[in-house]
């Protein structure tokens, strides 16, 4: 069984890496696995919380798609700007 303090350090390092990579993104839509390959579920909780409390600026939660939280990185100078550089998104079929 892993040492709990090591696990906490691993999560802290992943959380820092996640924040750094998201802050470096150009405006676009993304999901956590676009930023961190095979992220643990707890990291998804951290991302959701960080977006909602403003710890990660210029990012908004835009909903769910196939049980995955989707986010939008906004332009720093205009948080309401559209995501013009994003690839076209498919519309889920009922």
Image (tube, rainbow, N blue to C red):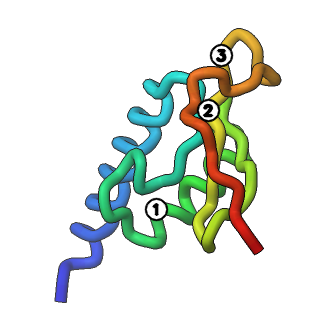
- Where's the C terminus, which quadrant? bottom right
Callout in the foreground (1, 3):
3
On screen, 88 above or below 90? above
Q: Which mark sits nearer the N-terminus, 1 or 3?
A: 1
- Secondary element at image label 3: loop
Q: Which residue is mark 2?
A: 73
Q: Position of residue 12 (x, y in %)?
A: 36, 54
Query: Mark 2 Cα within 10 Å, few/some/many (few <14, many 20+)?
Result: many
Residue drawn where x is 61% and y is 32% of the image: 73
Residue drawn where x is 32% and y is 64% of the image: 38
* Residue sitting nearer the eye, 84 or 13: 84
- Distance, label 1 to label 3, CA atoms, is 24 Å
Q: Is residue 21 visible?
A: yes
Image quarter for residue 55? top right
Query: Mark 1 Cα within 10 Å, few/some/many (few <14, many 20+)?
Result: some
Q: Position of residue 43 (x, y in %)?
A: 46, 62
Q: Residue furthest top?
A: 77
Q: Is residue 56 visible?
A: no
On the picture, is 42 further left or further right than 29? Answer: left
Image quarter for residue 74? top right
Q: Position of residue 17 (x, y in %)?
A: 34, 42
Q: Position of residue 70 (x, y in %)?
A: 63, 53
Q: Which residue is mark 1?
A: 43
Disc ID at residue 76: 3
User: Residues at badges 2 and 3 in contact (C-beta under 8 Å)?
Assistant: no
On screen, 86 above or below 67? above
On screen, 64 above or below 47? below
- Secondary element at image label 1: helix
């Amino acid at each position: 069984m892993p040492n709990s303090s090591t696990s906490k350090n691993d999560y802290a390092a992943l959380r820092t890496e996640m924040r750094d990579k998201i802050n470096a993104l150009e405006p676009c839509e993304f999901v956590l696995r676009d930023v961190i390959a095979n992220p643990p579920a707890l990291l998804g909780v951290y991302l959701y919380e960080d977006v909602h409390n403003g710890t990660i600026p210029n990012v908004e939660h835009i909903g769910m798609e196939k049980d995955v939280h989707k986010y939008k990185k906004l332009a720093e100078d205009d948080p309401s700007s559209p995501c013009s550089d994003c690839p076209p998104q498919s519309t889920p079929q009922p």
